[in-house]
Amino acid sequence: MNKERLKMLLKLQEVEFACIELNLYLDTHPQDQMALMKYNTCAYQLDVLKKQYECMYGPILNFGFSQSQYPFQWIEDPWPWEIEY
Amino acid sequence: MWIYEKKLEYPVRVSGCDPRMAQYVMTQLGGPDGELSAAIRYLNQRYKMPTGKSKALLTDIGTEEMAHVEMIQTMIYKLTKDASIEEIKENDMGAYYAIRDKAIYPADSTGNPWTAAYIQSIGDVKADLYEDLAAEQKARAVYENLLKLTDDPLLKDSLNFLRERELVHFKRFGEALRDVEEYSQCKKHY
Ligand SMILES: [Fe+2]
């Protein structure tokens, strides 16, 4: 995997992790407005990053959550366990 | 409904092949306190949860545990993929190899297959949440054992990430338990 792609993937993982962490926190603190603001900001950032990544390297979500160019790019390597970081 | 995301939650790196460590790590795939047990436990218990907070939390942590299953599978895959037959024999992986080559299979580090008997879902929501708290502590302890069994700094980084997740889950389950307790108090008053 080339350096540029790896950099984007790591950034994606970082922002998505922030979303996961804030999501679990909000599950038990739904009235924390600051946390919710951060969550919405991270979710927006994640959306932008995913679209950028998918535009360059193909879909990372299945079942209609991402579109694909021809031929169907979902089947392309590498799969998550094959990536050398 | 679940959808698949073609990426790991956190990078899994290893410095080289290590079939012995792969066998040890396997217990967090198919062992009693492994990630598969965690996911199946929470995703079954959630149906009896009485509050929005507890239903959401069990759904979300259960989902995150599936991402951890994938990280452990990736560790085993990476630790074994380049191992020669000699290395497999020298590192006590021969018995495993005889049954299934280097295929991934949910068993513990001594070869016992995963079983639903590892988990409970008894419908008493407080008892279930206490089990979840204990499960997170046990998983943390297993990660600490695994960290002592390797010197590979790259593998340690991924194991440390998973260890820290157990601490966060423990904290959130504690909050869910208090929420469920408050809920049952309120119900008694009316
Ligand atoms: Fe956990």
Image (cartoon, rainbow, N blue to C red):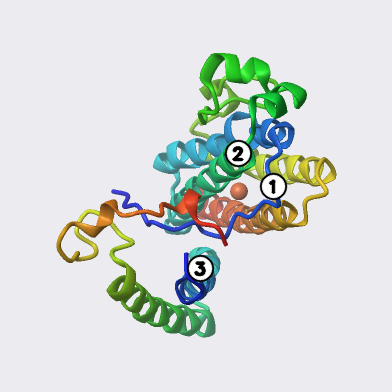
Residue found at x 77% / y 24%? B90
Residue at image location 75% in from the left, 27% down from the top: B91
The kind of secondary structure element at disc 3 is helix
Task: Please give left or right for residue B138 compared with residue B31 in the image.
Answer: right
The residue furthest left is A70
- Please indicate, yes or no, whether residue B112 appears anywhere in the rendered image: no
Q: Residue A69 location, x and y as percent?
A: 17, 66
Could you say which disc has been placed on residue B82 in the image? Answer: 2
Could you tell me if the residues under marks 1 and 2 are in contact, i.e. CB atoms within 8 Å?
Answer: yes
Q: Amino acid at mark 1?
A: Gly
- Residues at discs 1 and 2 both on one chain: yes
Q: Residue type at mark 2?
A: Asp
Q: Secondary structure at mark 1?
A: loop
Identified at 73% across, 46% down, the residue is: B140
Q: Which residue, given by chain and number where applicable, does mark 3 sit on? A: A13
Labels 3, 1: front one: 1
Q: Give the residue at x 67% y 58%.
A: B161
Nearer mark to the viewer, of 3 and 2: 2
Asked whether B142 or B87 is in front, the reply is B87
Residue where numbered disc 1 is placed: B16
Disc 3: which chain? A
Q: Nearer the viewer, residue A14 or B53?
A: A14
Q: Is residue B31 above or below residue A83?
A: above
Q: Amino acid at mark 3?
A: Gln
Q: CA distance from mark 3 to mark 1?
A: 23 Å
